[in-house]
Image (cartoon, rainbow, N blue to C red):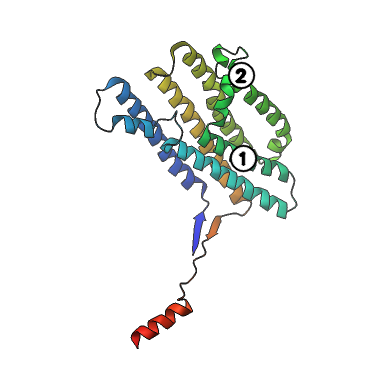
Amino acid sequence: MKITLCLKPWQFTKFLAVVAPCLVIASIVGQIAVYLLPDFPGRDSFATEFNLNEEGNFPSLYSVLTLLFCSVLLGTIAHIKKLDNARFVRHWRALAFIFLYLAVDEGLGLHEHLTEPLQNLGFKGLLYYAWIVPAAILLFVFGLTFLKFLFHLPARTQHLFITAGMIFVGGGLGMELIGGNYDELYGQANLTYQFLTAIEESLEMLGIIIFIHALVSYANRLGLKEVVVQVPIEKYETAPHLENKKQSLKA
């Protein structure tokens, strides 16, 4: 059986532009219910399953899947570039692995394990979420390494990449500075912190939506219009000994 996935930029963008806001609104509604409304059946479960600041729920699954999709698209583009003996194949591959790691990190929250050990070094205030420090250093090195790659891209793709990166990093690192400082002063168990988280996650989602639009558009430019997944389904065959048994029963 073949499953065909048509790569149409605006279809993906419109779909994600509906799903992402719904998840953000559900998270905000859930947190408002927890902090401002009386208890009612299913309130806490709903708030947990749609909390943007938790792993293993619907928003987390959405983020993991979109990051994985980016990784697959980047890997596919890298393969096409390799067949054409084009430049920057390694850069496309590296991006594919980076987004694969981001998907795993989103699902497991790996970066958060760096916070406590680094806090012991004295990071406070805006750097209370101390994982930001090594992340910012890696981001700077990444920017320098990929500068030539970025400027070799078509102008429209280049602009979309830059816009997506600025929005994503602004949410992932910029809002973490504000959220970390607020967390140190007032903790996370309040509605204000939940709103800060909603802004952060919304920016990250928007950045990924723009990036996916740019990748699908670029894939179309390379001639990739659809992805076909072959699902092998073997025809059921009766084992010989069972066939003989059937015949003996008929006799």
- The image position of residue 116, as x and y in percent, is 56, 20
- Quarter of the image that includes the C terminus: bottom left
Residue located farthest toward the bottom when viewing the structure as drawn: 251
- The image position of residue 18, as x and y in percent, is 40, 39
Is 248 located above or below residue 216 in the figure? below
Q: Residue at x 55, y 56 (%)?
A: 227
- Residue 130 can be seen, yes or no: no
Instruction: Say which of 16 and 43 sits in front.
Output: 43
Secondary structure at badge 1 equals: helix
Q: Which residue bears the numbered disc 1?
A: 157
- Neighbourhood count class around disc 1 (C-alpha, 10 Å): few under 14, some 14–19, many 20 upward: some
Q: In this image, 32 relative to 178: left or right?
A: left
Q: Residue at x 61, y 12 (%)?
A: 122
Q: Which residue bears the numbered disc 2?
A: 118
Q: Amino acid at mark 1?
A: Thr
Q: In this image, 128 relative to 189: left or right?
A: right
- Residue 95 can be seen, yes or no: yes
Can you tell which quarter of the image residue 151 is in?
top right
Cβ–Cβ below 8 Å for labels 2 and 1? no
Can you tell which quarter of the image residue 147 is in?
top right
Instruction: Say which of 138 and 241 sits in front.
Output: 241
Secondary structure at badge 2 equals: helix
- The image position of residue 52, as x and y in percent, is 43, 30
Is 32 located above or below residue 75 in the figure? above
- The image position of residue 55, as x and y in percent, is 46, 33
Q: What distance separates the C-alpha of mark 2 from that of mark 1?
A: 37 Å
Circle nearer the N terminus (2, 1) = 2
Can you tell which quarter of the image residue 156 is in?
top right
Q: Amino acid at mark 2?
A: Leu
Q: In this image, 202 relative to 35: left or right?
A: right
